[in-house]
Image (cartoon, rainbow, N blue to C red):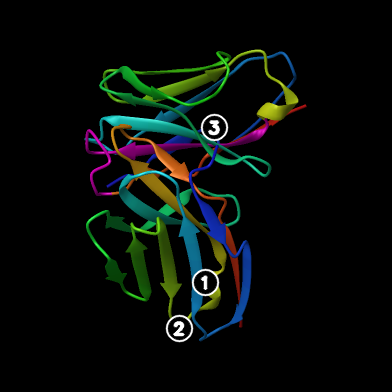
Amino acid sequence: SQQGEEDPQALSIQEGENATMNCSYKTSINNLQWYRQNSGRGLVHLILIRSNEREKHSGRLRVTLDTSKKSSSLLITASRAADTASYFCATDIKAAGNKLTFGGGTRVLVKP
Amino acid sequence: KAGVTQTPRYLIKTRGQQVTLSCSPISGHRSVSWYQQTPGQGLQFLFEYFSETQRNKGNFPGRFSGRQFSNSRSEMNVSTLELGDSALYLCASSRLTTGLGYGYTFGSGTRLTVV
């Protein structure tokens, strides 16, 4: 079963616009991670936010975490056509060793 | 440094056969985990190995098994293949003993098609 649910399932925007996607999860976590996947290839790690952090930035990416609501959001600013991909949140839950539980993903299409 | 290497990239097998997939983690990474990705079920955790020991196992039947060698390379095996085993199988390596904060590096995956 999946720990997280992502919203929306799909997103279509114009180049230069911002893209926001949300992730909800169910159990206490060590950290929450976001990954990108291009066309059924491998996953690329984007950013990790620990359970005691509320916001994190990396380049054009901004991630927030609200542990009281068990939710996270990923914002991609000034999107580019190359950002077209599927984005997944993954939770690393306490006492589970190295095991990620993924959400269903958000498919993002950035139109030039 | 080299990334996570998965071989083969593509595989076509017949129902009832067995298959072995290979994963070479990043040098120095001792944790290797495996995931199955299908359109219907999404990304699901299969199992994780650390220092040749299986530490975690997902909810998959016993037909799915794995092992890790002393050089941290890992293999997973699926016996008596079913059509539903068609999927992208992803391997991820991590340097840390637990997921305390550095993310995982994934390979490009092995796409298995069962006919």
| Residue corresponding to mark 3 | B8
Disc ID at residue A82:
1
Q: Secondary structure at mark 2?
A: loop
Q: In the drawing, does residue A51 fall left or right of residue A21?
A: left
Identify residue for label 2: A78
Q: Nearer the viewer, residue B111 or A97?
A: A97
Q: Residues within 10 Å of mark 2 (few under 14, many from 20)?
A: some
**Label 1: few (<14), some (14–19) or many (≥20) C-alpha neighbours in 10 Å:** few
Q: Position of residue A20 (x, y in %)?
A: 49, 73
Q: Nearer the viewer, residue B22 or B81?
A: B81
Dot 3 amino acid type: Pro
Q: Which is more foreground, mark 1 or mark 3?
A: 1
Q: Which residues are magenta?
A: B86-102
Q: Which image quadrant for residue A71?
A: bottom left
Residue at image location 43% in from the left, 49% down from the top:
A90
Nearer the viewer's eye, disc 2 or disc 1?
2
x and y percent of residue A87 in the render?
Answer: 51, 59
Q: CA distance from mark 2 to mark 3?
A: 37 Å
Give the letter of the chain under mark 2.
Answer: A
Left or right: B75, with A31 as reference point: right
Q: Residue at x 54, y 49 (%)?
A: A41
Question: What's the distance in space between the residues labelled 1 and 3, CA to CA?
Answer: 27 Å
Residue B24 appears left or right of A83: left
